Image (tube, rainbow, N blue to C red):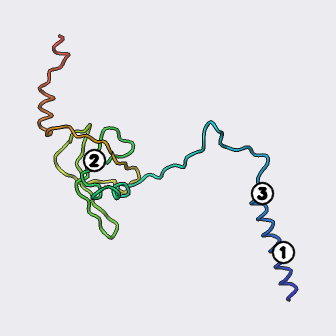
């Protein structure tokens, strides 16, 4: 019985040594996969949800502008965030398109847990209220009408 246990321990020891040698051996036939022209490959960044982006901003991102990574001219200004212990959270927003507010009302935001949000650092609001900007756009004459 003792001999059987000693023989078994010896074979297990030999097998682990063999496996260690295989894993540490370097292949000699395979060339390196990255070339010096390409440079080292950077790991992909993990996309973040709205709360992961806003947690590092002052006051949890209230009055800051966020947008989804694939949006070009639309952003949301965060107006209120309610964080609950059970994991559900509520966010209210004001929608901006081309740095103009679309509506004055605050609406509940959806899709905040999706992983595609970014912070817009250099957002500049258009001066004046929404009504003043619309009136100014209506009063400006078209160059096509004057040319005719």
Q: Residue at x 30, y 41 (%)?
A: 74
Disc 2 to disc 3: CB gap under 8 Å: no
Q: CA distance from mark 3 to mark 1?
A: 21 Å
Q: Residue at x 19, y 51 (%)?
A: 106
Q: Secondary structure at mark 1?
A: helix
Marking on residue 114:
none
The quadrant where residue 97 appears: top left
Read off the residue under disc 1: 11
Q: Dot 1 surroundings within 10 Å: few (below 14), some, or many (20 or more)?
A: few
Give percent across and percent down for residue 94.
22, 48
Q: Which callout, 2 or 3, points to the residue nearer the camera? A: 3
Give percent across and percent down for residue 15.
81, 70
Read off the residue under disc 3: 25
Q: Secondary structure at mark 2?
A: strand
Q: Dot 3 surroundings within 10 Å: few (below 14), some, or many (20 or more)?
A: few
Sequence-first tag of 1 and 2: 1
In-image side of 86 versus 11 (left or right): left
Read off the residue under disc 2: 76
Q: Which callout, 3 or 1, points to the residue nearer the camera? A: 3
Q: CA distance from mark 2 to mark 3?
A: 54 Å
In-image side of 109 versus 70 (left or right): left
Q: Secondary structure at mark 3?
A: loop
Which residue is nearer to you in this view: 25 or 50? 25
């Amino acid at each position: 019985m003792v001999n059987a246990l000693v023989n078994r321990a010896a074979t297990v020891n030999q097998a682990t040594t063999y496996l260690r040698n295989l894993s540490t051996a370097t292949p000699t036939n395979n060339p390196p996969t990255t070339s010096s022209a390409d440079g080292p490959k950077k790991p992909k960044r993990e996309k973040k949800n709205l709360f992961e982006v806003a947690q590092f901003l002052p006051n949890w991102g209230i009055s800051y502008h966020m947008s989804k990574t694939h949006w070009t001219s639309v952003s949301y200004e965060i107006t209120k965030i309610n964080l609950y212990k059970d994991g559900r959270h509520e966010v209210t927003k004001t929608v901006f398109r081309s740095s103009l507010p679309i509506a004055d009302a605050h609406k509940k935001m959806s899709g905040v847990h999706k992983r595609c949000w970014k912070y817009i650092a250099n957002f500049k609001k258009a001066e004046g209220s929404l009504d003043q900007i619309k009136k100014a756009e209506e009063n400006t004459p078209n160059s096509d009408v004057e040319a005719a």
